[in-house]
Image (cartoon, rainbow, N blue to C red):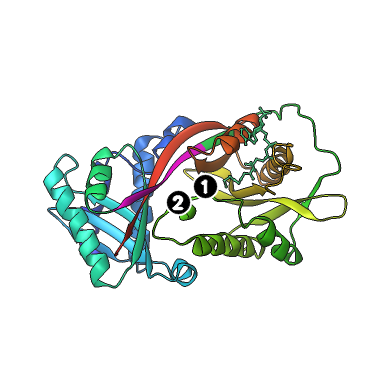
Amino acid sequence: MVENIEKIENIISAYPYPPELYFTKLGVSADEIIAGWSSEIINRVKNGTPIIFQENLGLVCYKESSFDTKVLKLNTARIYAIIPSDIDNMESLRALVEFVTDSLFSVGVEYATYRFNSKDVNLQDVLLARGFTKVDDYVVLVRNAETPISEYTRPQGISIRIAQELDVPILQKNHSHTFTSSRFFVDPAVTTEAATLMHSEWINNSVKKQVADEVMVAVDETDTPIGFITLSVESKYNITTGHIPLIGVRRDPEFVGKKIGRLLMEAAFKWFNDRECTYFFIETQGANYAAIKSYEGAGYTPIGQGITYSWSNN
Ligand SMILES: CC(C)(COP(=O)(O)OP(=O)(O)OC[C@H]1O[C@@H](n2cnc3c(N)ncnc32)[C@H](O)[C@@H]1OP(=O)(O)O)[C@@H](O)C(=O)NCCC(=O)NCCS
């Protein structure tokens, strides 16, 4: 495959919908974003991620995910890129997607997901026609580190501390129904039990710092967790960014909408500032109005959007 790298780079460079195109709004050029995406895919390929490349059709890069396979009890693959050689040629796009599903099927993949730029409407049409399901319509919000924190009434008796492994069982119990708007819960190929387990494992692995850099909990006066936030730092296009992959407040009228989410975010902002993040990012489903409202109240504004499709072999 190494001999085709130049051709692969050319196809990626001609594709107008790199997933993180919204970085242009932070002053990064579209060329730089495409180059970044291209080298991300090439690096994956160099590190052993399979790529299917047909010069006349385009390329597809995907990898089986052992963690998702274990939790979902389905042979799962994550698709990283579906890029046609000629974006205006629907026939070759159809052939490329057909090639994807045939290839997934032939290697025993039972379930696959692909997150991409929702502006690629041709691809959406073809995926739907080929039996994919749209499972997520997400919005990306950004906050400038320098935006001042607006005044709000802090919840009484609630404080924030670093999560400990001892907190994991109560967090898992409290939040078994918190994330029901996430893509796993709406995906017909995933059972409710599997979706619950996915989030439960996600909490566990975050507190153990396997998939997050830090986790904080909001606790009441008895030090009992009633909410949590996971944090990570990334560096891209020479910008250091702070991310909140997961935030949840116990779904109880006593706690919801009481600015506990805001208090958790304020602690996150301090943590990000200490790590010199210039922008903070957060994502949620476009229909998760409560979350979007809460993030906007904390100073975030929408900057981009994306979409997730899933494919199942039955
Ligand atoms: C998102 C979440 C963490 C916010 O925490 P919260 O403590 O409930 O919210 P806050 O009190 O800090 O947010 C306050 C704002 O959100 C608004 N809000 C909260 N719940 C709302 C609801 N159900 N409908 C509409 N608006 C709502 C409030 O009106 C308030 O607006 P204001 O600041 O203009 O007064 C919480 O709603 C939650 O756990 N949701 C489920 C999990 C989830 O979806 N997480 C995000 C995806 S990872």
Density class for disc 2 (Cα within 10 Å; few <14, some 14-19, many ≥20) is: some
Q: Earlier in the sequence, mark 1 or mark 2?
A: 1
Give amino acid for label 1: Ser
Density class for disc 1 (Cα within 10 Å; few <14, some 14-19, many ≥20) is: some
Q: Secondary structure at mark 1?
A: loop
Asked if residue 137 lies in the magenta stretch, the reply is yes
Give amino acid for label 2: Val
On screen, 77 above or below 152?
A: below
Name the dominant secondary structure of the magenta segment.
Answer: strand
**Residue for point 38% across, 42% down:** 33
Q: Are marks 1 and 2 in contact (CB under 8 Å)?
A: yes
Q: Position of residue 161 (x, y in %)?
A: 78, 52
Query: Does the beta carbon at disc 2 come under 8 Å from ligand 1?
Result: no
Quarter the N terminus occupies = bottom left
Q: Quadrant of residue 107?
A: bottom left
Residue occupied by mark 2:
186
**Residue for point 37% across, 56% down:** 113
Asked if residue 191 lies in the magenta stretch, the reply is no
Residue occupied by mark 1:
181
> Which of the pair 266/250 is nearer the observer?
250
Quarter the C terminus occupies = bottom left
Q: Secondary structure at mark 2?
A: helix
Number of marks in the image? 2
Ligand 1 occupies quarter: top right
Question: For the magenta stretch, what is the residue range?
Answer: 132-140
Q: CA distance from mark 1 to mark 2?
A: 7 Å
On residue 72, the disc is: none
Q: Position of residue 264 (x, y in %)?
A: 71, 44
> Which of the pair 291/240 is nearer the observer?
291
59 sits left or right of 241 in the view: left
Query: Does the beta carbon at disc 1 come under 8 Å from ligand 1?
Result: yes
